[in-house]
């Protein structure tokens, strides 16, 4: 009789064989022959002192592993009696909080990563991904509890058992064909994830060159997905890497599709016809803005014919509507620019920020506090064009007699009149 101590793989396979005892003997041997090399490889990684507990931590209990083999091979589930025996043989769990946090912490991180990737892709804004920093504590605690309690504690959770049973029922029922098709595509999915991660980084670089700093991290994640994806069946702990990254890829893919649709739609709306090139714009307060070409105006200055700036000018359009825009002013208590409603009176006072306060200090006593002031000075000198000679009234249009028309009916002229009463008021601009 041999006194050689059985290896961990032999003990593990013996329990798997027992869990598959209701199947035909030939099929059980065929299943065991398929998984034996894989178990031997894991045992070699763990070293010569590998124990059954180490295999259980990597693969789950032999009974749960046998159930996965049944589902993968399309075999019926174990009889209820054997399942009850497995439950009775399993020691009582010390608590469900740790494995539950390990599971749902990973699920929460995956969901948030998908949403952030979707938003970043739609808006093509890498700054949104800074929200991933907030997930680091949750994900770190989830990983720590996973390695502390082992993956089997997570697999033994009631919600995990319910999900696995529902998935098995779906595979054996209406989803049999879809499950077979998806299983065939699984090896390619990890490569697709890697490609989409790199494409996601390149998309962000289209509008933001500083997003190039994010590209190395995405490349590392792509390589990790290709390496870990094919090993999730052997080591369930790798799901804590594969699931969140897969969710990130799915969210980014949908967001990228939405961004492409938006760009195509906006491109078509830019050039429908020359009459509707742009739509009215509003400021942060909901007020309409004046535009000159493609530039929004914040102030308007009016001058008379002599180049003198006019004050308190009210602007209206051809239908008598006031051209009202937001008026800004300096709030002296806070030293910041504030809104003061809207009106159509121009010009606005110029708000100058960062000027000296009453004590002569720039930006006040505290350099972090801004100061501002208002000034009515015109920031430029206007060059008023002179009317051309052809627009001057001809001498033939003057009355031939020495009598002068009433002062209210005198013709306009840019030159001062020879009479003493006409030199007291400037001439209006020639229309």
Image (cartoon, rainbow, N blue to C red):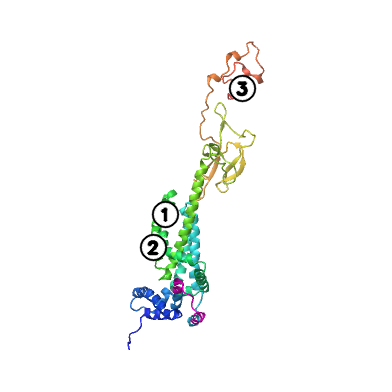
* Residue hosting label 1: 199
In depth, the one of 259 and 297 nearer the eye is 259
| Residue 26, disc | none
Q: Where does the magenta region start and end?
A: 68-85
Assign a secondary structure to mark 2. helix
Quarter of the N terminus within the rendering: bottom left
Q: Nearer the viewer, residue 260 or 114?
A: 260
Is the residue under label 2 in contact with that under label 1 (CB below 8 Å)?
no
Residue 94 pos. (x, y %): 49, 78
The residue at which mark 2 appears reads as: 226
**Is 372 placed above or below 127 here?**
above
Q: Earlier in the sequence, mark 3 or mark 2?
A: 2
Residue highlighted by disc 3: 424
Whole-percent x and y of residue 344? 61, 37
How far apart are the alpha carbons under marks 3 and 2? 90 Å
Left or right for 403, reference 51: right
Query: Quick check: can you spot residue 421?
Result: yes
**Is 342 a magenta residue?**
no
Within-10-Å neighbours for mark 2: few <14, some 14–19, many 20+: some
């Amino acid at each position: 009789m041999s006194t050689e101590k059985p290896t961990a793989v032999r003990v593990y396979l013996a329990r798997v064989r027992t869990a598959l005892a209701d199947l035909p003997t030939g099929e059980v041997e065929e299943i065991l022959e398929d998984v034996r090399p894989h178990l031997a490889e894991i045992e070699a990684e763990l070293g010569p002192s590998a124990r059954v507990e180490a295999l259980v931590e990597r693969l789950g209990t032999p009974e749960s592993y046998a159930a996965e083999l049944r589902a993968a091979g399309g075999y019926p589930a174990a009889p209820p009696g054997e399942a009850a025996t497995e439950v009775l043989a399993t020691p009582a769990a010390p608590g469900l909080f740790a494995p539950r946090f390990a599971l749902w912490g990973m699920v929460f991180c995956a969901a948030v990563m998908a949403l952030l990737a979707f938003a970043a892709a739609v808006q093509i804004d890498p700054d949104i991904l800074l929200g991933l920093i907030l997930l680091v504590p949750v994900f770190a605690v989830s990983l720590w509890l996973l390695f502390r309690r082992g993956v089997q504690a997570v697999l033994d959770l009631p919600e995990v058992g319910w999900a696995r049973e529902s998935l098995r029922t779906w595979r054996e029922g209406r989803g049999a064909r879809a499950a077979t098709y998806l299983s065939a595509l699984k090896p390619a999915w990890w490569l697709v994830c890697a490609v989409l991660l790199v494409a996601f980084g390149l998309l962000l670089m289209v509008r933001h060159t500083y997003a190039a700093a994010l590209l190395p991290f995405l490349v590392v994640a792509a390589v990790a997905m290709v390496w870990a994806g094919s090993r999730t069946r052997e080591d369930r702990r790798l799901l804590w890497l594969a699931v969140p990254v897969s969710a990130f890829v799915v969210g980014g893919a949908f967001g990228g599709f939405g961004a492409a649709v938006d760009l195509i739609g906006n491109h078509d709306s830019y050039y429908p016809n020359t009459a509707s090139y742009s739509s009215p714009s509003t400021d942060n307060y909901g007020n309409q803005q004046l535009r000159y070409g493609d530039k929004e105006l914040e102030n308007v200055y009016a001058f008379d014919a002599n180049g003198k700036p006019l004050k308190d000018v009210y602007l209206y359009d051809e239908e008598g509507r006031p051209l009202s825009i937001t008026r800004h002013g300096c709030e002296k208590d806070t030293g910041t620019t504030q809104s003061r409603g809207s009106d159509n009176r121009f010009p606005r006072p110029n708000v100058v920020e960062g000027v000296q306060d009453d004590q002569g200090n720039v930006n006040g006593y505290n350099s972090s506090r801004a100061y501002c002031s208002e000034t009515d000075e015109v920031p430029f000198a206007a060059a008023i064009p002179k009317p051309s000679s052809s627009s001057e009234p001809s001498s033939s249009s003057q009355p031939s007699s020495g009598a002068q028309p009433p002062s209210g009916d005198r013709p306009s002229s840019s030159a001062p009149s020879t009479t003493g009463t006409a030199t007291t008021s400037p001439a209006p601009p020639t229309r």
